[in-house]
Amino acid sequence: MRVLVTGGAGYIGTHTLIELIAAGHEPYVVDNFDNAVPEALNRVSELVQRPIPFTDCDVRDRKALTEVCETFRPEAVIHFAGLKAVGESEERPRDYYDVNVAGTLTLLAAMEAVGCRRIVFSSSATVYGVPEYLPYDEAHPTVPLSVYAKTKHMAEGILTDWQRANPEGAVMLLRYFNPVGAHVSSRIGEDPQGIPNNLMPFISQVAVGRRDKLMVFGDDYDTADGTGVRDYIHVTDLARAHVKAIEFAEHTAGAEVFNIGTGQGYSVLDMIRAFEKAADRPIPYEVTDRRPGDVAAMEADASRAAKHLGWRAELGLDAMCESVWGWQSANPQGYEEGR
């Protein structure tokens, strides 16, 4: 299939491009490089040994998006483009609603202009909010806490209503848990701009000497060691889930929700210890106050994805940490190393 990938130069997008091409699909990227760099696409091109076509385009630019769609004629879309930091979303709510919600509406308009009716949406397990039970399944109530989570939840609603109005269409809503890891080649990985918002890139930057210590946000949660527990999933497994979802959408109309996680939770201290083993060095850290909007624990019931998509996570904690250390140690300054 011809697959338009918004935000395709980002962390999850680049790994998904590799899996799409391996499965025989033809991707085209649109990205405004707000939180990504062209060098990432250069490296994907190197790995797959073919050029990656792309347009420098903001997802809110209806004219540019429509022109891309009219030229490329996508048969499906994977929608990654968006702002994604929970803390930042509380400080910049207008920007988050503009990009994550208005951008989704603009994308749908461009898709409609060329009759494209299949979309896989990059959603988030944060839409569930405080757990009423664990692991979360797709029937769990959705009570998003942060602005970021609210924008994802709102976009899910828009896409579901759009599919209802276009009954031949297919909408796949993938609720990710916590993506970590890097490609086995160590050529692509997570390279956040500025101070990382997520745990693993912060740990890896401490390990490589870019930062002095890790800040652990709270050790008084109701968990085994007091630190927050999350369901971490290897980005390669996550990328494979998108390919499975696109292929499912090719033959199945409707709006579907799938949790994408492992079902295994690890605490912040578990992750520090596992990374210390992978990198063979200590990770200094300091405990500080909890962050607003964080919950004690999040774990996935991903059995629905296994049943309908034929997808299961295959890579465990050691592979996650080893691949992150491979990426960060080979690229101490991230993609700056290759530019």
Image (cartoon, rainbow, N blue to C red):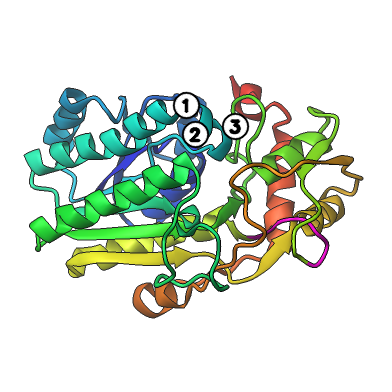
Marks 1 & 3, CB-CB < 8 Å contact = no
- Give yes or no for residue 76 being in the magenta stretch: no
| Location of residue 254 (image quadrant) | bottom left
* CB-based contact (under 8 Å), mark 1 and mark 2: yes
Q: Can you give x and y, in whole percent of width and height, for residue 251 in the image?
A: 19, 69
Q: Is label 1 or label 3 in front? A: 1
Inspect the image, locate mark 2, and give the three-letter code of the amino acid beneath it. Answer: Ser
Report the Cα–Cα distance between label 1 and label 2. 5 Å
| Residue topped by disc 2 | 89
Is any part of residue 136 visible from this angle? Answer: yes
Which stretch did the figure color magenta? 224-230
* 326 left or right of 213 in image: left
* Residue drawn at x 50%, y 49% as measured from the top left: 145
226 or 200, nearer to the observer: 226
**Which quarter of the rendered picture does the C terminus lie within?**
top right
Q: Quadrant of residue 57?
A: top left
Asked whether the residues under the numbered discs 2 and 3 touch, taking CB atoms below 8 Å apart as contact, a structural biologist would say no
- What residue did someone put label 3 on? 192
Q: Which mark is residue 258?
A: none
Label 1: which residue?
92
Q: Look at the numbered disc 1 and give the secondary structure of its residue.
A: loop
**Secondary element type, mark 3:** loop
Residue 40's place in the image compared with 223, above or below, is above
Q: Say which quadrant the N terminus sits in.
A: bottom left
Question: Mark 1: few, some, or many residues within 10 Å (few <14, many ≥20)?
Answer: few
Main SS category, magenta section: loop
Distance CA(mark 1)–CA(mark 3): 18 Å
